[in-house]
Image: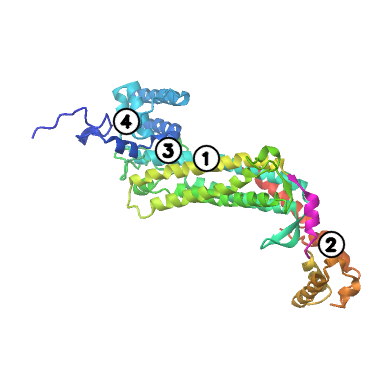
Amino acid sequence: MKPRRATKARGKDKPWAGRFTQSTDPSAERFTASLAFDQRLWSYDITGSVAWAKALGRAGLLTAAERDTIVRGLEAVQGELATGAFPFRPELEDIHMNVERRLQELVGEVGGKLHTGRSRNDQIALDERLYLKDSIARVGEGLRRVQEALVARAAETVDAPLPGYTHLQRAQPVVLAHHLLAYLFMLQRDRQRFRECAARADVLPLGAAALAGTAFPIDREALAKDLGFTAVSPNSLDAVSDRDYILEFLAAGALAGMHLSRLAADLTLWATAEFGFVEFSDAFATGSSIMPQKKNPDVAELIRGKSGRLYGNLVAVLTTMKGLPLAYNADMQEDKEPFFDSVDTLEAILGVLPPLLASLTFRTDRMRRAAGEHFSTATDLADYLVRKGLPFRQAHEVVGRVVRHALDEGKALEDLTLAELRHFSPRIDGDVKDAITVEASLRARAATGGTAPAAVRRSLALARTLIAQA
Ligand code: ARG
């Protein structure tokens, strides 16, 4: 049989059109195109292609002149992309084929040599790893700025009592700085998680080609050095078919989002009339279209709300990857939008949170008053009895009866007379009054990690050292 003649109908000029006799249906073309979102990877794609051209040169597959022509051509394409002059063509599916086609237009036939021994499968894995490393650097820096804002507010509030809660019921006094620093240490672990994710992702996938490895004598170690990777993937199937580095990023993002949502939720709660512990600056609040008196903490609420999409993105990619047979599958193109959305969401939160924190007005007077109410130092009375020799379980029982009595009488703990108190335990003396103040309660918790101002000062110093480290 005679070979078929190439026709125009053959898939609108696609780089892979050789074996096709029909053009792609426009609906299929729209459906499979990833250009709308993967174009964000252009600079990484070009960096990878420049390094690949050099590797092909070293392997003797390009002459020095051909290599230079290709590299200069890629630089011209980069210029067009940077200035917005690049002619994007969605019918060429993705950023890889768009860049390659434009290169060929600019440098001619030699541009067709660039894709020797590589595949879009190792190309996209490379682009995503490069983008991941940069994104982690930005997110890490954003987290550090939030930590700096927390340290600044903590430094002002080491001696400011605040009611501490369990079950959202008043529990024991803490200082405001202690509460703020709790978030700082959570974010420190988030920064570590991102850093560890970047370290594990620091492996070169390029050279894995489509799935079986490149067929040319590419020095992958040199290529890794060129592209700033510390290691080379030891298995080509693994290199093109796993996305665990993206999933780790999404998981770290979900955790950070959870921490940030709790901080935002605390502030939202504290800004209610019922609490009245904080006031948002007008610059970080919004009004109501119908209720003229309203000042709403929308920024904090949205920080809380955005944790939802950070979780969703993680679950979306986990679900996409589940059960996929090795190696590359088109399903994996679905990794990008959730990945990018988490990067954008984290950067948006981390951009707005530091100035928001700096602009809060803490109502330390109201916190101070609330910190002493509702028997918040009852544990300190029990601890007092322990110091007088009573086993803690008995002390707990005695103080429980004291509280019951005070509740029946409609009195606060400090309203009870010494005689009333001694009725419950003869071990109680005149020194009890000083033992159950808010200040005494705070001061007592001086062991490392406790809320005593002296201990909090030590934590603050530790926090400062941690955030000074990259
Ligand atoms: N756009 C693709 C992706 O995002 C790039 C790799 C395509 N490879 C392929 N054989 N279709 O995953």
C-alpha distance separating marks 4 and 3 = 25 Å
Q: Determine which of the numbered discs, if any, sits on residue 127 in the image.
A: 3
Quadrant housing residue 152: top right
Mark 3 crowd level (few <14, some 14–19, many ≥20, 10 Å Cα): many
Q: Locate residue 325, reporting x and y percent.
A: 32, 52
Reply yes or no: does residue 368 show up in magenta: yes
Q: Is residue 348 above or below residue 456?
A: above
The part of the chain drawn in magenta is 361-375
Residue depicted at 34% across the width and 39% down the height? 31
4 or 1: tag closer to the N-terminus: 4
Residue 33 in the image, given as x and y percentages of width and height: 35, 37
Q: Residues within 10 Å of mark 1 (few under 14, many from 20)?
A: some
The colouring scheme, among rainbow, by chain, secondary structure or one colour, is rainbow
Q: CA distance from mark 2 to mark 1?
A: 47 Å
Give the number of the mark in front: 4 or 3: 3
Q: Taking the image as drawn, is residue 230 in sight?
A: no
* Mark 4 in CB contact with mark 3 (< 8 angstroms): no
CA–CA distance between discs 4 and 2? Answer: 81 Å
Residue that badge 2 annotates: 437
First in sequence: mark 4 vs mark 3: 4
Residue 417 visible to an observer of this rendering: yes
Amino acid type for the residue under numbered disc 1: Asp
Residue hosting label 1:
344
Task: Determine whether the beta carbon of the residue marked 1 sits less than 8 angstroms from the nearest atom of ligand 1.
Answer: no
Going by the numbered disc 4, the residue's amino acid type is Gly
